[in-house]
Image (cartoon, rainbow, N blue to C red):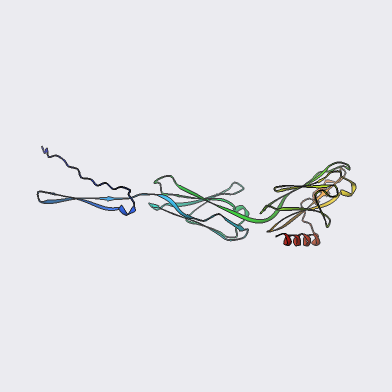
Amino acid sequence: MDNTPVTEYSIKIQNVNVHDEGPYVCSILTSNTPKSSKVHLIVQVPAKITNISTDITVNEGSNVTLMCLAIGRPEPSIIWKHRSAKGRTFVTKGEYVDMTAITKEQSGTYECISSNDISDPDVRTVKVTVNYAPFISKAKSTGTPVGQKGVLQCEASAVPGADFEWYKEERRLFNGLNGVKIENHGKQSTLVFLNVSEEDYGNYTCVAVNTMGISTASILLYGPGTLMHDVNKATLLPHSSSCLLLTVFLLLLLKF
């Protein structure tokens, strides 16, 4: 039985980095005969995102490329995630995301997720804002008797947010004049008639405008006896007056 004491030899490497990776040889001399043992050190590095696109604002129809670069050992994988306004989740792999003729539905926050199973994934985000022309999604009116309070409502989605204007025929209406009040709250504009008269009945045009364009809708202020067919036909129809559109367009140019 060999009772020769066993001697252990070790090397301690502090603050290990990738440059320490490689073969290490331990050599000892016994009875004038060298003996060697080889160990290969593999250095693993958690995934880390080193470069990512900054938040961006573009006009609808533009081409957009998002970039996300990461380092790690083993080489990390990159996944992009985006949840649209309609709740759909977009997932793709790779360092780059290319979007041709971007739409407003593609706006929002994009997540870059880098991982190599060494530690928790590294996650960074990019916010994409898409400017688009106003789209009137809601135009509402209710039958109002003479002498009562009447309300017309107009709602428009737009980026940047839309400014609203109201017209009766070619005449623009202003807040506080001729017995009407205009209330704007975010995406919605309301035209309030404090005391409806017979002369107030008729078609009104809601105009939503921003730097990207103009959208119009015709809304009918009507009395209790008006047929609903006529009301539905007037609501959300584009205004056909070229004079009115030209007026609004000139105001748009002067404003922006």
- Is 170 drawn above or below residue 146 in the view shown? below
Q: Nearer the viewer, residue 13 or 101?
A: 13
- Is 254 drawn above or below residue 42 in the view shown? below
Taking the image as shown, residue 76 lies to the left or right of residue 198, namely left
Residue 186 position within the rendered picture, expressed as x and y whole percent measured from the top left: 70, 47
Residue 156 position within the rendered picture, expressed as x and y whole percent measured from the top left: 71, 51
Which residue: 75% across, 60% down?
A: 251
- In the picture, the quarter occupied by the N terminus is top left
- Is 206 drawn above or below residue 149 in the view shown? below
Taking the image as shown, residue 10 lies to the left or right of residue 43, namely left
Residue 216 position within the rendered picture, expressed as x and y whole percent measured from the top left: 75, 55
Which residue: 59% across, 46% down?
A: 87
Q: Say which quarter of the image contains residue 58.
A: bottom right
Taking the image as shown, residue 67 lies to the left or right of residue 138, namely left
Q: Say which quarter of the image contains residue 64.
A: bottom right
- Count the numbered circles shown: 0
Residue 93 position within the rendered picture, expressed as x and y whole percent measured from the top left: 48, 53
- In the picture, the quarter occupied by the C terminus is bottom right
Name the outermost residue toward the left.
31
Q: Nearer the viewer, residue 68 or 253?
A: 253
Which residue: 70% across, 54% down?
A: 134
